[in-house]
Amino acid sequence: MSRKSSQKFETEREPVVSSRAVVAANQPIASAAGISMLAAGGNVADAAVATVFTCGVVEPQMVGPLGGGYAVHRDSNGEITVLDFYAEGPGLATEHLYEPDPAAGFGMVKGDKNQTGHLASGIPGNAKGWIRLHELKGSLPLSQVLAPAISAAENGFPISSYLRYSIANTREQLSMFPESANTFLHNGEVPPVGHRLVQREAAESLRLFAEMGSDAVYKGPIGKALVVEMEAGQGLVTQADLDQYEVRQPEPIRGTYRGLDIIGTPLTSGGGLLNMLGLNILENFDVRSLGFGTAKYWHLLIETLKIMFADRAKFLGDPKFVDFPHDALLDKSYAKFRASQIRMDQPGIPEGGDPASVTSGHTTHLSIMAADGSAVTMTTTLNNSFGGRVMVPGTGLLINNNMALFNPNPGLPNSVGPYKRMLTATAATVVEREGAPLFAIGTPGGIRIFPTVLQGIINVIDHEMSLQEAVEAPRIWASGNTVEFESICDPSVISELERMGHNMFELAVIANSMNAVQMDQNSGLLTAATCWRGDGQPAGLSGAFAKHRDDWFG
């Protein structure tokens, strides 16, 4: 049911407000898995690992153990740990691996080889990253943490209309690979809504994770099966690649915006750095007085995003391979200079950057917070829907197609390279006030992730939206001449932007189901919100155990 909002739009969903803990994930079974860990006495890391492994079962188009991602963990004392477990280019990968096909679109290559099939897969990182989070911060046995995912895989769950839509959209590619077709198609056809999807081989793989940890992939039978399949399909991932893979633990991106502390993911996730650049630019303007959804507000945001994408294309790549002006890009004086280049009466000339392309939401995000101030915000993916669409025989697990995130042209900061991590757009973010947690936020959505998270942040801070309003609010996206806007945007405002000179292009959805968690620093109550753009449903834990009374015992 739509709800009246303090803004010029109506929200579709209700948030959850709880006293002990909240989980916001993009599938209700996954949110329930996380809350069950907290109810059992576990912590936010246990909840995050239970949630994300369950997402790999109930959102198979979005994520799985053979993908990659990033996590930000906040201890109750405020200590931040960032884990970078994104995919890497295999050792045999070179910058001439693919033949670019610019006629097909930005980043596309001849034969679709960086999108579908074995050559699209980078070295996976999810399994190692998820379990590293548990090793560093978890408290419950891994077997207990993985139990909800195992149950969902073995007993099945009803397919939603969203999952059915995803299967229908990739039916042709899934049909190319027998294991994938046998799992996700029903007698060769797209299954109906409500059809129970059972994944028994995936359940067996999850049991291996419970027994062996990430060694099940990097030293054990799942990895061996992956390497055999790669050899059969002329992919590049080898056992040597798995042997050398390590989870990185970089320092987070840190900055301030209007007196609040912003903590985000560093490279090769460019989202944290770019969002800090964007916030530093916006700090030079009175964003609140422009009003949400007005032509002047959207214009300012469009021009800011164009600058962010220009600097992304010019400077950013894997910091192990590319030197870039990290400190300069985060300097508020640089942002002030960039802000001075924005004219509020007309569009600026794009400096370059990723051109507009077909929207993508094929990733998942989860945000978790407990009453003690601990939190996890994690974005993790197979990249495109069902990744490379190849299921490793006997494992029930899909390969990723993260190689599509490299620029297929040689000689650039984000060109393909061996043991190089591709530039991504993820932007898992924690916002604090005077050392106390305020909210944590993130979203799926491919190249549209960090601009969408940026909008979520300023929705809360500048426009003073509720958390539910912030994640559901209309969105725009721009990187060059074309500006994308959601169909729920005010058409009269879009017309005004066109009169200003913006080339406006309508989409039903930009990015995907952003979710967030928040702590009220006065009451201590926790809120979790997900939006209508996905299957997300938040969950909360409230109440307390019985209050002790001496007279109970005579």
Image (cartoon, rainbow, N blue to C red):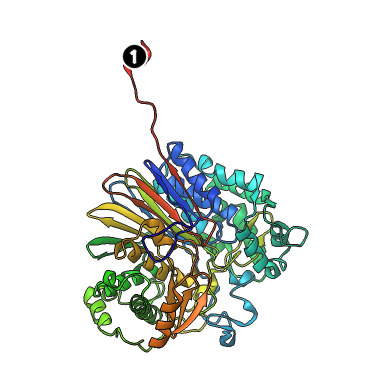
The outermost residue toward the top is 554
Q: Position of residue 158 (x, y in %)?
A: 65, 50
Q: What is the secondary structure assignment of the residue under circle 1?
A: helix
Q: Position of residue 495 (x, y in %)?
A: 44, 82
Q: Position of residue 473 (x, y in %)?
A: 42, 65
> Residue 262 lies in what quarter of the image?
bottom left
Q: Disc count in the image?
A: 1
545 relative to 123 in the view: left or right: left
Tell which of 109 and 500 is nearer to you.
500
Query: Residue at label 1?
Result: 551
37 relative to 266 in the view: left or right: right
Q: Quadrant of the C terminus?
A: top left
Residue 468 seen in render: yes
472 in relation to 373, above or below: below
Residue 228 seen in render: no
Q: Position of residue 431 (x, y in %)?
A: 31, 58
Q: Residue at x 63, y 59 (%)?
A: 161
300 in relation to 430, above or below: below
Q: Residue at x 54, y 44 (%)?
A: 146
170 in relation to 545, above or below: below
Tell which of 402 and 348 is nearer to you.
348
Q: Amino acid at mark 1?
A: Asp
Q: Residue at x 53, y 41 (%)?
A: 143
Tell which of 502 and 116 is nearer to you.
502
Tell which of 538 and 67 is nearer to you.
538
Number of other residues with Cα within 10 Å of mark 1, as a class: few under 14, some 14 to 19, many 20 or more = few
